[in-house]
Each structure stands twice: as C-alpha cells, then as structure tokens.
Image: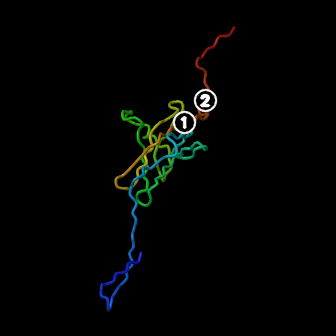
Amino acid sequence: ISIKCQDGDVKEARSSEAGLTIAVTDQNDHRPTFHLSKYKGHIYENSEQAQVRWDPANGAPRAHDKDFGRNARLTYTLRDFTPNAPVIGDSEFFKLDGGHLFVNMVLDAEERTSFKFLLEATDDGEPRLSSNTTLEIFVDDVNDNTPFFEQSLYMFE
C-alpha cells in the first residue's frame, strides 16, 4: 500500500509518499486432522525391522493442518491405546522413522495376531494443537512351523 501525507500549507504544500507492507500472520486455529478415525495395517510375522503395509484402499495415516507455515508443521508420536496398558504397551512394538511405521521386534502370529494403539499428530504452533487416530496392526501368519504328531501312538480299528 502506498501512503501519501501532505502538509496544510496552501501556498507551498509539501508531501511525501512511503510504501506500507502489511504482513498477515497465521493464527494457530486449526487442529491437525486425520482422514480416518482408524487405519489398518499388516506386518508378516518373523519380519525384523519391516515396514507396516497399509490397507491400499485408505493408504498410510497422514494428518493435515489447515494452518500454514510453522502452525502446519506436524510431529507424530505413538501412544498406548489405554492409560492402564501393560508394562510394555502396544506402541512399544513399533517405531516411527521418517514418517513410516516399522516393527521394532520380531513378532509371532502364533503368540499374538494384532496390536492396537494411537498415532498422535501435534502441530508446531502456539498453542500446540493435536489429534489422534487409532492404528490396528495385524500380524500375518507365514508357514513357519513344522507339522508334528501330538501323540506318539495312534490306534485305528
């Protein structure tokens, strides 16, 4: 915007002009939002450091923030689904790295077939705003056990 000021002298009026820049700053007024309230993923058992495969229909969980700049910069954190979770919560079995979810240890489908925890997205604004979505990860069984007879002797008639 250009601003002009002029003095009140009728005979020799003097004036000057200056430019004025107005910077509109974003207010952190939007929470991050996830497209879905629940995302389902799969991991093969016995896979060490493998990346979770997401349901192709919905894709990987990703939050969006309608703000811009710093207020839209997001950080993701894994949280246990329930406050009274066991000593090792479900989120301890997985880790986030570069926006991708990886298994943190070898899983066995014969011991446990699924895990449920929260993914929290927090923006970098002031105040920091966050939201979460549920992650349900299924451990897919592979043929890793040799068949065996449960008894040493069988009788037939």
Helix, strand or loop at mark 2: loop
The residue sitting at the right extreme is: 157
> Residue under circle 2?
146
Q: Image check: 152 left or right of 15? A: right
Q: Image check: 36 left or right of 7? A: right
The residue sitting at the top extreme is: 157
Q: Amino acid at mark 1?
A: Val
User: Where residue 28 appears, x then y in whole percent?
Assistant: 39, 55
Residue at x-position 38% and y-position 75%: 20
Q: Which colour scheme appears in the figure? A: rainbow
Q: Which callout, 2 or 1, points to the residue nearer the camera? A: 1
Label located before the other in sequence (2 or 1): 1
Q: Nearer the viewer, residue 20 or 44?
A: 20
Dot 2, crowdedness within 10 Å: few (<14), some or many (≥20)? few
> Residue under circle 1?
139
Q: CA distance from mark 2 to mark 1?
A: 19 Å
Q: Is residue 71 above or below residue 94?
A: below
